[in-house]
Each structure stands twice: as structure tokens, then as C-alpha cells.
Amino acid sequence: MTDTTDSVDVQSPAPDAEPAALEARSLTKHFPVRRGWGLRGGAVVHAVEDVSLVLRRGTVTAVVGESGSGKSTLARMLAQLIKPTAGEVFLDGAPAPAGGRSYAKLVQLVLQDPFASLNPIHGMRYILGRPLKIHGTAEGRASDEAIQDLLRRVALTPAEQFIEKLPHELSGGQRQRVAIARALAVQPRVLLADEPVSMLDVSIRLGVLNLLADLRDRERLAILYVTHDIASARYLADSIAVMYAGRVVEAGPAVQLTDHPQHPYTQLLLSAAPDPDRAEAPSLAGAGSPPSLVNPPSGCRFHPRCPFAMAKCAEQNPPAFEVGPGQTSACWLHETSSTVSATAVEERTTSSASSPSPTSSEPETPAG
Ligand code: SF4
């Protein structure tokens, strides 16, 4: 536990296996706040601070956190819908071109709400045919065949019937599959999925997660999976980055991180994940709530909620300490090989963070 970095880098496993498809380097986003709402003019919301991550082809990287943790803002910066205050995005190892059609062709975003993301007056032929036409992928009769191929790729069969349907004739899960098919229409290399299953019935979430896993394996897509549900992240992702109040606090291989969480916030998240073997309902109640990002806490932003907080925690932001193979944790408990601290973390880990269930309902952490 001697290696440290200023920010937590999130690497997908087997970094040598595939080149980086999309890379965020020290991305930061501060939103200016207008006067009103009890706030002074000139105030800023510190939504994302110094986040670096690498998305590689054929892997899923999950970003997990409560509402307001900055995970969706991070996804929107990667999609170039929001301009970063600082930091850079790299595509295939080179600085990403600024927005526009060429970038959207390679990096696609799937949104949370499948009911709002499809125009209700248009059928599947129009919804899926439009991106094919705009990006010149298929025209005329070829377009119908390409649309049916897209429908089959997301398991909406028989495709000849689905191509005639309107959005209101589809279930939530089927709509989300259409939204994913629309993203696939331009043959992207990177798929950014922002809470893609959180608005779906529990019974159909697994089907959409399995579809994303299938796209990773079959089409070698680099996928960012944004979620508040660490159980589904463990199920789907190869690596996980846990965000709290705009910062990545822990990152590492998905199974290793959820089996041996080292950061107190990751342990808290896991303790609130649903577990069929646990009698009582999961809850984050009593553990406080996320801080204001207009005036975020000094030092470690988790210190007002942390059961292990020390004087130093309120004064200095901890760097990322290496806590296992490919696993880092930004917590002062890892600064030295303090037996007391390490034991305290390990004991809490084993008592509260047994492996979560991938198919269970979402924990009581807010969405977003
Ligand atoms: Fe808790 Fe301090 Fe670690 Fe932050 S740095 S998680 S306050 S022990």
C-alpha cells in the first residue's frame, strides 16, 4: 500500500489485451449557479473533479454512485453533450474531435428513460431508419433489411413484425432494446449506457443487462455502464469505479472490488445492496446523505459520513492508494500499513459486504 496517484485511474482488466477506445483524463465539471435559490451569484456546483478512466473494447466499465455523485455528468462529458471545465477526452489514443457527427458515429449514449427517448408518433421503421440514413449506412430497400438486422441484434423478433410497431405497443424493456438498437445503427465503438435498466421492471432488467453483455462479447464494444446499483454492476461489469460527490473513491476489477471493498463508502454501498440471504431490508438510513456540491466538504468529501474519519480527513483530500492488484482506494486509512486501520476495514468488509445478488431489486440509494 505504498503506491499513490493524485486521481483514481479506472482501468479495465487485461489492459494490454485491447487498446483504449475512449479515455477520460482528469475530467472536471463545475456548473455555474445563477443568483437565487438562496445562493450567491458566482457560486459553482463541483459536479465532477479530476476523474480519469479508460474504456477498452470488449469490456464493460461500471460507474457506481448515489444520486448527485457526478456519474451521469461524467457520461455526458464523454458523449460531448457537456463541455468539461478541465481535462481531456481521448478517442483511440488521440484527442477526441470536438463533437459533431463523426464523434457521435463512434460514441453513442443510451439514456435512462425508454419512454421519453423514443418519439411516440414514429414507428420502428422511422426511428431505426433515420440514423442509418443520416450516417449513410443503408438506403432504400437495404434500409428495411438493415432495420430488421438491428432488431434481431437486440433480440426483438420476429423482426418483420417489430418493424411495423409504434413505441406505445412495446414494453419498457422492448423500448430500451430499441434505444440500444438505434445506438448500434451507426456501428459505434463505444456505448455509454446511463442507468439503462433503472426505469424497467425488476423482472426484465436482467434481459437488458444480458443484452449489453452479449454486445460486449459478440461485437467487442467498449461499454460504460452508469448505475446506482452496485449489485448489477458486479453482475455485468469487468471493472467498477465508485464515485462519491464528484470524485472516484475506489476502482478495480468488479468481483475483487465487491468481494473486498476497501473504501468505507464502497462498504456502505454494499451494505445497502439487496441480499436474499439477509432478513432485514437494505438501507443507507442513518448513514447521512450526500453533501452539497456547491460547498463540498473539505478534504475527503466523505468525512462527514465516515465512521473512520480522522482529523486529517477533513483537511486533505486523500490520493489513490493501491490496495490490491489493479484496485485503488482514495482513503487515508491506506496511507500506512497500520494494522489497526487495515483490520478495521477488513472486519467491516466481511461483516457487511457479502456478494450482492445480480437479480434482486434495487437498493434504497436514489437513482440518477
Ligand atoms: Fe473516511 Fe478518512 Fe478514508 Fe475519507 S479518508 S473515507 S473520511 S477514513
Image (cartoon, rainbow, N blue to C red):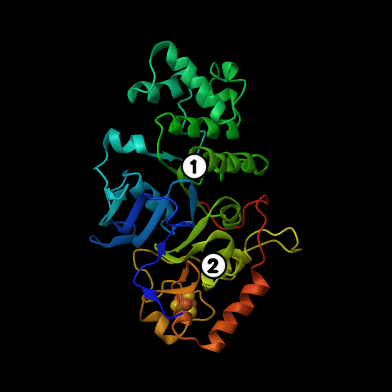
Horizontally, is 319 left or right of 160 in the view? Answer: left
Q: Can you give x and y, in whole percent of width and height, for residue 109 in the image?
A: 41, 40
Crowdedness near tag 1: few (<14), some (14–19) or many (≥20) residues, C-alpha within 10 Å: many
Q: Residue furthest top?
A: 141
Q: Callout 2, which amino acid?
A: Thr
Look at the image and tell me whether residue 301 can be seen.
yes
Q: Does the CB distance between marks 1 and 2 fall below 8 Å?
A: no
Query: At 56% from the left edge and 26% from the top edge, which residue is drawn?
Result: 152
Callout 1, which amino acid?
Gln
Is residue 228 or residue 331 the one in the foreground? 331
* Disc nearer the start of the sequence (1/2): 1
- Residue 81, image x and y in percent? 32, 43
Callout 2 crowding tier (Cα within 10 Å): few <14, some 14–19, many ≥20: many
Label disc, if present, on residue 266 of the rendered structure: 2
The location of residue 92, given as percent across then percent down, is 32, 47
Q: In the image, residue 210 lies at what x, y percent?
A: 60, 42
Task: Work out whether 63 lies above or below 325.
Answer: above
Tell whether circle 2 marks a residue whose Cβ is less than 8 angstroms from ligand 1.
Answer: no
Asked if residue 51 is positioned above or below residue 153 in the image, the reply reads below
Measured in 3D between alpha carbons, the distance from the residue under mark 1 to the one under mark 2, in whole angstroms, is 23 Å
Residue at image position (40%, 77%) is: 3
Residue 98, placed above or below residue 231: above
Q: Quadrant of residue 184?
A: top left
Which residue corresponds to mark 1?
A: 112
